[in-house]
Image (spheres, rainbow, N blue to C red):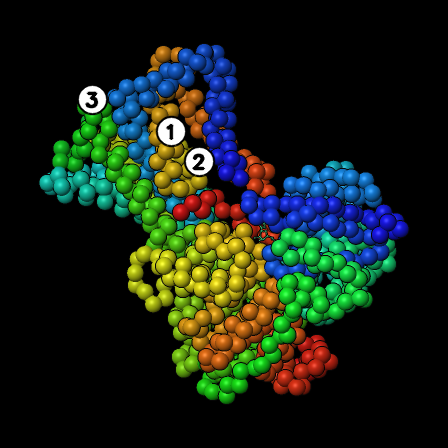
Amino acid sequence: MSSDPAPLLRCRQITKRFGALVANDAIDFDVRAGEVHAIVGENGAGKSTFMNVLYGVLQSDAGVIERDGLPIRFANCAEAIRAGIGMVFQHYLLVERFSVAENVMLNRERTRSGFVDREADEGIVADIAARYRFNLDPRAAVETLGVGARQQVELLKVLEREPQIVILDEPTASLSPFEIDGLFDVVRRLRSQGRGVIFITHKLKEVMAIADRVTVLRRGKVVGRVQTHATNESELAAMMVGRAHVAADDSRPQTPARNVVLRATGVTVKSDSGRSAISELSLVLRSGEVVGVAGVEGNGQTELVEALYGLRPCDAGSIALSDADVTSAPTTERRRRGLRYIAADRQREGLVLDFDAVENMLLGDQRLGTNAVALNLAQGQRRADEVASVFDIARYDRKAAMRTYSGGTQQKFLVGREANDETRVVIAFAPTRGVDIGAAQAIYRRLRDLQTRGAGILLFSYDLDEIRALADRILVMSGGRIAGELSLEAADDTTLGRLMGGSAA
Amino acid sequence: MKAGRVLAAVGPLVGVLVASVLVILVAKANPMAALGALVQGSFGSVQSVAETFAQSTVLLFAALGVAVAFRAGLFNIGAEGQLVVGALCAAVAGAALHLPKALEVPICFAAGALGGAVFGLLAGWLKARFGASEVITTIMLNYVAYLGANYLVAGPLRGSVSAPETAQIVPAAMLHPIVPLTRLTAAFPFAIVVAACVWWWLGRTIAGYELRILGRSERAARYAGIHVPAVIMRTMALSGALAGLGGASDVLGMLHRFNAELSPGYGFTAIAAALLAGSNPLLAIITSVFFGALQNGALSMQAIAGVPKDLISVIVGLVIVYVAINRFGMRAALHGPPSDDLVTRDEPLAEATT
Ligand SMILES: Nc1ncnc2c1ncn2[C@@H]1O[C@H](COP(=O)(O)OP(=O)(O)OP(=O)(O)O)[C@@H](O)[C@H]1O
Ligand SMILES: [Mg+2]
């Protein structure tokens, strides 16, 4: 180590506490010029906390940060930015109604005689976008963009300031495989320009593909640091959980598919902007089967889910749960018939972050099977306890706000609530987004249990591996239609890619 | 963290105190004498304490109304108008009906609540049906209430020759002082019971739970199968009903008739009281008494120290400013953003305390 030039950034003994909880425990860490340094660890290991310390969002309780060998302290992000650090957060921070250029240049607008020089801003943004081969219109409103494009906007915000160190907190969590390839190109380019990249992910495959070194965190401590060429996925997984990695349980429950539990016939739905988002889409889900829905983001998946769950009216066609027509039934009625939805956006839709675990476990079920006036807190408590024990949630506290749990833990609560004994049909939208391997397996197990019990599962995911791991058959969505159906055997990357690109439609 | 919370709560009060002293100095009076007179006037004797509670009563009802709306993410600026309508309804019922006291008083309160509810519902309906911002509509409806009531008591409902006001309510409708020689009536303990009920209702009932979900995120509410327009209307009706109870308590307990000047801006002070309480119904008891005390002590302050009693309005304004600073500035400084969840979300006005 001592023979190397001073790293771009080095931390010694960084400790960060939240009350009694030690989220970061004496972390030593460095990132060098021209290096991609991955950080992995289970949910709640302290990765995001550590990044927030490096980026000046949080202040450490002990430890020092050195930039180019000189000690430095960040009282806030602005100081970290000045020191050449840029960060893309796990959850994006964009102004929906602003254009791409306005978002990128926010607070740094070029001005001409006191007014914002829109053209100059757009020119600058178009320039960097071209340099990184982003296919983005600087004038497009952010609200019209998909997840992948939004992330590019976030990246542009960071890259426009030419940072020496770029932090990416779970950048691939909601990207499709193609978008991930694009992101990797950017990361490689940053590396070749001699910048340092810190890359957080739960997917070890990505670590092996992109990182030069990897640091493993467990319960706030560094438990390992290796060169990627000297390790492999299962060794990393074992380090993360602190025991030999249990091979993923791939056994599929062999339940013969039986009666239809969800049927959509000729469903046509409009998007928010009034354009047709789904046209004449039909699908059938049987009891005991998992149907995967693959597709590039923005091809009608969201609208389809909302129509099935009762949040968006159908302009034509019908939706039935088992034998009951629910085309115009409200969400409550559909839930009463056993429909559940693992929401795509857990933070604003599936959970209420300011409520505690108990109240969150009642969300959506508050009126099911009761005419009572009082809220059934006992039921919420039972369910919260059950989920906490089944999913092995560390530091479970009934009264703690959902906000204080890590993203992966929030997801466990959401899945635990939606997948239970009463579930007949569950729509799972990216159910393992941002959760660690152990938790992902627990979630898969929960879903397979449901399947064994005869529920039908409609799995939407941008992660093809996830779809292949769970689904019995695969539908590909493109342009608001089902572009094709594939058996598991036929679903290789090329075939899927071709259908997702819409070439068969 | 604990200390931070306490500081965040006490900070505004200390700030308001300091700022008030400055305002008093500007008014060229002796701050100590002025504050002394204020405290003396509001808590100096059994009578003045009772009078403070009496003045807090209307405020507390209205503050509860504002707080309930806040918890659903609705900014009800219309407590004043709802209170005026409620007062008018209670006064009309109290003058027209001749029932035994055990019936007359509850019916008059119910009339006040109903009037306020209908008036609140109007704003709720405009929002649910047309998406009209409740901030705008409730402000405008305040004028409708004021001017409408003025017209009614000057014309069709005039019940007195000497002034534009309704006839006196029948004795059976009057609430009598529970402390002699003051205006403190059973309406004050009633308001406290209502506060406790609202607290329970928000925290422990399904309807209250749904209201709070909506206050945090409309998308989560829709996800949970909540019919958002219905909850908006229900909430505004409840909010108006609580303010209407305030108006009724004013008529039954203090004025015994309605005239259009009956509220010295209770509905606006109530916004400050609700904000300061973080929309917690139990804390609203304390903050309402705080503002009730200021209002009550203001007269002695004016009499003894020569400080204009309108200073109180300045102080109310300061509280709103401080609460705003506290919400949007101090909070971030004290707690920092949560590690994982730097999401842009609709920042609710209420603390989750139930
Ligand atoms: N503001 C906070 N207050 C209290 N506890 C917190 C706060 N932020 C984080 N924590 C706790 O600190 C621990 C580390 O959280 P952190 O978000 O850093 O985990 P992570 O490794 O990023 O997890 P994930 O993979 O789920 O994103 C967790 O136990 C979390 O509950
Ligand atoms: Mg994280």
Q: Chain of mark 2?
A: B
For image coordinates 35% across by 57% down, the residue present is A375
Q: Secondary structure at mark 3?
A: loop
Q: Chain of mark 3?
A: B
Amino acid type at image mark 3: Leu
- Image coordinates of residue B127 in percent, x first then y, are 43, 52
- Image quadrant in which you'd find residue B113: top left
Which one is earlier in the sequence, the residue at label 3 or at label 1?
3
Q: Nearer the viewer, residue B198 or B111?
A: B198
Q: Nearer the viewer, residue B222 or B268?
A: B222
Amino acid type at image mark 1: Phe
Alpha carbon distance from label 3 to label 2: 31 Å
Question: From the viewer's perspective, is A431 left or right of B276?
Answer: right
The local crowd at label 3, few if under 14, some if 14 to 19, many if 20 or more residues have their Cα within 10 Å, is few
For image coordinates 49% across by 80% down, the residue present is A452
For image coordinates 31% across by 26% down, the residue present is B52
Residue that numbered label 2 is attached to = B276
- Image quadrant in which you'd find residue A362: bottom left
Q: Are marks 1 and 2 in contact (CB under 8 Å)?
A: yes
Q: Nearer the viewer, mark 3 or mark 1?
A: 1
Kindly indicate whether the residues beneath marks 3 and 2 are on one polypeptide chain. Answer: yes
Residue that numbered label 3 is attached to = B181
Q: Is residue A408 visible?
A: yes
For image coordinates 70% across by 70% down, the residue present is A234
Q: Secondary structure at mark 2?
A: helix
Q: Chain of mark 1?
A: B
Q: Is residue B77 visible?
A: no
- Image coordinates of residue A52 in percent, x first then y, are 67, 48
Amino acid type at image mark 2: Leu
Q: Which mark is residue B290?
A: 1
